[in-house]
């Protein structure tokens, strides 16, 4: 077994990826690693409270490490903080980094290049698996997940706070990937075969927020709008 860490977002893709990695018996997963907005104590981009992230890690039984980031870090700051953690993980004995990416080639190449420089190998257990197959497997295995963030470019406010089930999939517009692999939506897993117990929470308000668009993307968009469903630990 290779000593590894899991890049954990708290959402369905990383949860199913972790499940498959554990089932394979090929990886001794020592840590979960998550990027956190240190200003608001929430998972970066997903907007989920740190307390719920910690509850997930406790239920899984794998120690949590976090990359502490400002509200809107630039790439240099993100990469610096990430590499500090990656180097510490390497020093602790980790040789492999596990990711839940599915088909974004540029993102995979970016991860592989950055971690190769640090002497870490990347593993992608759900790479190139059909996304409708993945999400139906996710539901069939008994995972339960709630939508915590939607990109208004793809989905309206009504999708925020919904449970991922067959009804949710049926309502998705044809241009939206069933796993949200293009950033259309993000989720929070609250029950799973890899959990010792479900994560208890209550739904709070739905907030709207705009973010500056990344520069040099070739798109004529200056800002992106997102809806966030607040989850409050029960």
Image (cartoon, rainbow, N blue to C red):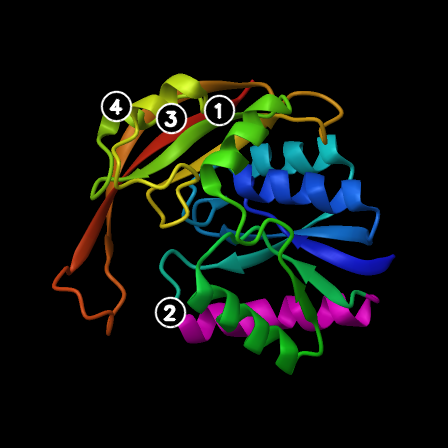
Q: Residue furthest right?
A: 1
Name the residue tied to disc 3: 169
State the CA–CA distance, disc 2 to disc 4: 31 Å
Q: Residue furthest bottom?
A: 117
Q: Nearer the viewer, mark 1 or mark 3?
A: 3
When the figure is inspected, residue 30 is found, relative to residue 217, above or below; the finding is above
Quadrant containing the C terminus in the rendered view: top right
Name the residue tied to disc 2: 74
State the CA–CA distance, disc 2 to disc 1: 29 Å
- From the image, give the main secondary structure of the stretch colored magenta: helix
Q: Nearer the viewer, mark 2 or mark 4?
A: 4
State the CA–CA distance, disc 1 to disc 3: 25 Å
Name the residue tied to disc 4: 158
Label whose residue precedes the other's in the sequence (3 or 2): 2
Residue 20 seen anywhere in this rendered image of the structure: yes
Label whose residue precedes the other's in the sequence (2 or 4): 2
- Residue found at x 26% / y 41%: 175
Label whose residue precedes the other's in the sequence (2 or 1): 2
Q: Nearer the viewer, residue 86 or 167?
A: 167
Q: Is residue 233 left or right of residue 175?
A: right
Secondary structure beneath label 3: helix
Q: Nearer the viewer, mark 3 or mark 2?
A: 3
Label whose residue precedes the other's in the sequence (4 or 1): 4
Segment colored magenta: 74-93
When the figure is inspected, residue 202 is found, relative to residue 176, above or below; the finding is above
Q: Nearer the viewer, residue 223 or 124?
A: 124
When the figure is inspected, residue 31 is found, relative to residue 138, above or below; the finding is below
């Amino acid at each position: 077994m290779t000593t590894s860490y899991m890049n954990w977002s708290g959402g369905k893709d990383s949860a199913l990826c972790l499940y498959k990695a554990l089932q394979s018996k090929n990886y001794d997963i020592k840590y979960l690693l998550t990027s956190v907005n240190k200003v608001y104590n929430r998972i970066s981009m997903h907007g989920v409270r740190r307390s719920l992230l910690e509850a997930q890690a406790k239920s899984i039984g794998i120690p949590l490490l976090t990359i502490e980031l400002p509200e809107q870090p630039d790439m240099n700051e993100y990469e610096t903080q990430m590499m500090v953690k990656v180097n510490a993980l390497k020093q602790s004995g980790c040789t492999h980094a596990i990711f839940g990416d599915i088909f974004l080639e540029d993102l995979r190449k970016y991860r592989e290049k950055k971690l190769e420089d640090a002497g870490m190998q990347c593993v992608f257990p759900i790479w190139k698996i059909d996304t409708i197959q993945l999400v139906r497997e996710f539901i069939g295995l008994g995972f339960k997940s709630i939508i915590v963030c939607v990109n208004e470019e793809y989905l309206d406010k009504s999708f925020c706070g919904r449970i991922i089930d067959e009804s949710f999939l049926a309502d998705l517009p044809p241009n939206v990937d069933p796993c949200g692999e293009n950033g259309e939506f993000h989720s929070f897993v609250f029950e799973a075969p890899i959990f010792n117990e479900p994560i208890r929470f209550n739904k709070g308000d739905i907030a709207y927020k705009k973010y500056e668009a990344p520069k040099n993307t070739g798109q004529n968009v200056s800002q992106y709008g997102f809806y966030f469903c607040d989850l409050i630990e029960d």
